[in-house]
Amino acid sequence: MKRGLAVVIMAVAIGAFAGMPGASANGIRIWTGETNQGLPLQFTVVTDHGKTFIPVWKISFQMLCEKDGSVFGDTTEYRGFDVPVVNGKFSYEDPYVQDWYFHWKGSIGRGKAHGVAALEHPAFTGHIKLQVCTSGAPPWTATRGGAVGSSRIPSVSFLTSVVRHPDGSISRTVTAISH
């Protein structure tokens, strides 16, 4: 009887640890949520042979420009960067684009994740003067497999895609979207 109980307790413990970030069980989990700006974010967490990482993420920001006060949306997606998750924590700062600042960090727990993200880049005013546009550093929350956040995005927005290709090269494309 004691041996049977020990086997059951061990099976429950293994099952509990398998769902934790950084666990050795292989798998892919989609996380969705939103920033405190009410805009959506989504990321994928992969565990493969004991290593946990985030290969793909997409975050929408509301940008505010410092000189003319213009506001626009910028949805930024990254693919192929394999950001490591260590002890449930991750951090990524984009070192590849000189005129661009992107930073994203967070903590992943059992079914819930949270953190902050920031985006900053140059833009021109209506009078052809250079200015900085920033998202600030909005906090975000997400749940495993949860619903994608709000679809509320300002009427003029951009989709910025940053991809690390298998050969190590990096490409960035910016697409203007008018709603």
Image: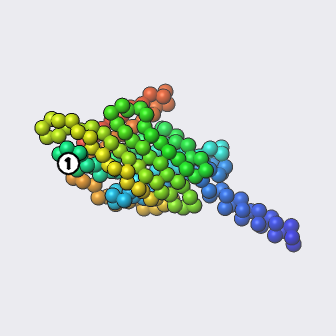
Q: Residue furthest left?
A: 127
Quadrant in the picture for residue 149: bottom left
Q: With respect to residue 58, does 139 lie above or below?
A: below
Looking at the image, which is closer to me, 89 or 162? 89
The residue carrying mark 1 is: 70
Report the side of 124 relative to 160 (left or right): left
Whether residue 177 is visible, yes or no, is no
Q: With respect to residue 131, does 179 lie above or below?
A: below
Report the side of 3 relative to 93 (left or right): right
Residue 57 in picture, x, y percent from top left: 44, 47
Report the side of 91 relative to 174 (left or right): right
- Name the residue located 20 percent from the left edge and 48 percent from the top edge: 70
Looking at the image, which is closer to me, 134 or 142? 134
Looking at the image, which is closer to me, 39 or 138? 138
- Name the residue located 28 percent from the left edge and 55 percent from the top edge: 153
Quadrant in the picture for residue 14: bottom right
Residue 37 in picture, x, y percent from top left: 33, 58
